[in-house]
């Protein structure tokens, strides 16, 4: 449109993205990091002005770009033989009890982690850190359970550091459901906005449960039930179906 002005964030991110792609490659960890940062920033802009069409169009393009990297990547996991898909529609995944008891139960000998059962936006915004990443599961009873310890965007892309609340032990998805070890979705999520108007950026990245893409509708339904979000307010990135053979190399290790 004549006389229209591009949002300054769009121009700035385009400039930095071009520089990083030239220096490190278009699918490098640096570019993946920037795409995530741009998506969260532009989602925040949309919360302030949902009529910002140019920003909305860029968000849609970013979702496609990030999902493409998930589709051509995968997730590094040594635990493929420790989970099993026990139901497909809707998905239900179970983690191996002996493996859990051996590797993770000792970390819970002082009790179950302080997992947040999200039942409303008020719950979520009172206990979680908007703009930060949290691990979550949707358990076999369709409850949204979130670990309150936040981690940064850099940790989302490059790998998490140990949780402060667990004396240096890193909390992993099976530890959120220690009694039954069953989930319908698992991954990471970022909450944006406030209890009255919010958006969510989430994924199905769990090296323990390896959720298939069919888990995304389950997560979306749960989010729409407990938060004031419409379908266009939620991004959910999926990973390919886990292969049944030996673990393959992961060209998008940035997505772990």
Image (tube, rainbow, N blue to C red):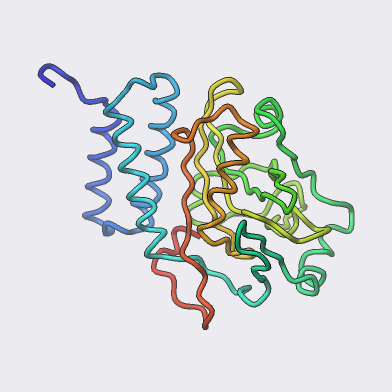
The front one of 77 and 184 is 184
Tell me what residue is drawn at x 61 percent, y 74 percent: 80
- Residue 249 lies left or right of residue 167; in this view the side is left
Residue 155 in sight: no
The front one of 44 and 243 is 243
- Residue 83 lies left or right of residue 27; in this view the side is right
The image quadrant of residue 40 is: top left
Residue 35 in sight: yes
Vertical comparison of 26 with 189: above or below: below
The front one of 10 and 242 is 242
Relative image position of residue 91 (x, y in whole percent): 62, 59
Tell me what residue is drawn at x 41 percent, y 65 percent: 73
Q: Which quarter of the rendering shows the N terminus?
A: top left
Q: Residue furthest bottom?
A: 246
Tell me what residue is drawn at x 73 percent, y 57 percent: 169
Q: Residue furthest top?
A: 3
Tell me what residue is drawn at x 37 percent, y 38 percent: 38
Q: Residue furthest right?
A: 110
Relative image position of residue 12 (x, y in whole percent): 26, 34
Relative image position of residue 133 (x, y in whole percent): 57, 43
Vertical comparison of 71 with 81: above or below: above
Relative image position of residue 22 (x, y in whole percent): 21, 54
Vertical comparison of 113 with 44: above or below: below
Q: Residue furthest front?
A: 89
């Amino acid at each position: 449109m004549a006389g229209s002005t591009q949002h300054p964030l769009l121009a700035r991110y385009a400039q930095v993205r071009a520089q990083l792609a030239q220096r490190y490659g278009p699918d490098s960890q640096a570019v993946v990091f920037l795409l995530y940062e741009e998506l969260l920033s532009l989602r925040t802009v949309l919360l302030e002005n949902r009529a910002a069409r140019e920003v909305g169009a860029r968000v849609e393009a970013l979702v496609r770009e990030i999902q493409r990297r998930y589709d051509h990547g995968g997730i590094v996991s040594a635990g493929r033989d420790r989970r099993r898909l026990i139901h497909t529609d809707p998905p239900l995944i179970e983690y191996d009890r002996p493996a859990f008891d051996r590797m993770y139960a000792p970390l819970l000998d002082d009790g179950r982690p302080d997992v947040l059962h999200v039942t409303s936006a008020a719950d979520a915004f009172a206990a979680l850190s908007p703009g930060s990443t949290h691990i979550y599961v949707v358990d076999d009873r369709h409850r949204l359970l979130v670990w309150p310890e936040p981690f940064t965007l850099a940790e989302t892309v490059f790998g998490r550091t140990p949780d402060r609340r667990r004396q240096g032990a890193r909390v992993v998805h099976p530890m959120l459901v220690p009694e039954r070890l069953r989930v319908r979705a698992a991954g990471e999520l970022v909450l944006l906005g406030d209890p009255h108007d919010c958006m969510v950026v989430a994924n199905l990245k769990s090296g323990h449960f390896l959720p298939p893409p069919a888990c995304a509708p389950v997560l979306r339904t749960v989010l729409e039930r407990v938060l004031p979000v419409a379908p266009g307010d939620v991004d959910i990135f999926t990973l390919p179906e886990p292969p049944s053979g030996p673990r393959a190399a992961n060209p998008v290790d940035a997505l772990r």
